[in-house]
Image: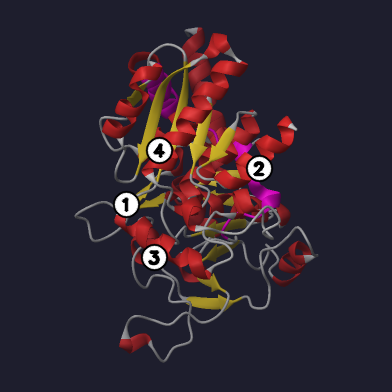
Amino acid sequence: MHVFLKIVLFGLLISCNNASAVDPNGYLAYCPCMGRFGNQADHFLGALAFAKAINRTLILPPWVEYRKGEIRSTQVPFDTYFQVEALGEFHRVILMSDFMQHLAPTVWPASKRISFCYMERKSLSPSKASKADCHAKDGNPFGPFWDTYNISFVSSKFYSPLNFDVHHSTMASKWQEQFPAAEWPVIPFTGAPASFPVQSENRDLHRYLRWSNTYEEMKRAFIKNKLPRGAFIGIHLRNGIDWVRACEHVRDSQQLFASPQCLGYNNERGSLYFELCLPSKELIIRQIKRLIKSVKQSNPKNEIRSIFVAADANHMLSELNTALSRMNVTVHKLNNDVPHLDLAILGSSNHFIGNCVSSFSAFVKRERDVKGLPSYFWAYPKEKERQHVRVHEEL
């Protein structure tokens, strides 16, 4: 038999054995039912940390996506975007499809499927309103998520007053004591067993979240074929109408969405202000020019040659190309809307400027942190504070 074929068959055999081997410590499943990808990624890191702390195999859920013109959410397999093997370096994981196909019939039969939630969740259906239940499949994306794998629940379990903070207490042992694997082989949560934004202790787990080979190849191809040779800055702009409305809450908040990533979890690095959430076009252009000049002065051999823009609405291509034309810098974006490819490219840029409040930017920042790459935020620190620091350094 050809050597290559033997290797392939051996790999498939190992995969099948891993998929059919039962973990005596039990399993943890959950629906990533809050928000879009950025929020789900924050939750995933927390769920991964929680699964390891209570020593259960994490069942990798599909990513929940919402597409224009479609009423129900779409479930995208976890490994479409990320490598399963890389996560295995930190803790035991299994794809939800593999678990349901190979293990669920014996480990988690339909008659034993009990959903977990902190407390009663009100039903959207009047006929179910009187029953105290998690109502795990009520609404979108809850129903479509579990339906993807033909999962229904026979009853519910409330786990109050337990929580998911396993870093500052003996909470992990309390979960193990109250829900032993012998009695509860699978704990399926109606939502993610994690906080948002991601706890600071879990940020470093992003090192195990590595792009799939498909996205790695697409990223490299775009950088090689579409961007001029040389260094480039990746920028993320949030300026869609939904985001503009969200930023109105800045005036009444100490923190908003992912803002702890630059302000600190206790606002130890500053307070929230409007420009941090929605910087003006003029500020964006000034900050990009300032970074280009700074890189040129500090590293002339690696000058910035291009800007890659990811945005939820206005990419500002015309404004940026006009503003940067004399600096011999060109501006680029993807031809099609592929958010995850945006993320992969931003993560590999020589420099990155993101939105402090955005969880989409936060994903890029965490990836770059574990790679040791530089990142910055729009309007942070405030321009007046930046000028004060510069004068102080000169003095």
* Residue highlighted by disc 4: 340
Residue 34 falls in which quadrant of the image? bottom left
Q: Amino acid at mark 1?
A: Gly
Residue 142's disc is 3
Q: Is residue 221 visible?
A: no
Residue 240's disc is 1
Q: Nearer the viewer, mark 1 or mark 2?
A: 2
205 inside magenta stretch: yes
- CB of mark 4 within 8 Å of CB of mark 1? no
Residue 158 falls in which quadrant of the image? bottom right
Give the magenta range: 196-223
Task: Name which of mark 2 and mark 3 comes first in the sequence.
Answer: 3
Cα separation, mark 2 vs mark 4, equals 38 Å
Task: Name which of mark 4 and mark 1 comes first in the sequence.
Answer: 1
Q: Amino acid at mark 3?
A: Phe
* Quadrant in which the C terminus is drawn: top right
Q: Amino acid at mark 4?
A: His
> Where is 112 relative to 121, above or below?
above
Cα separation, mark 3 vs mark 4, equals 23 Å
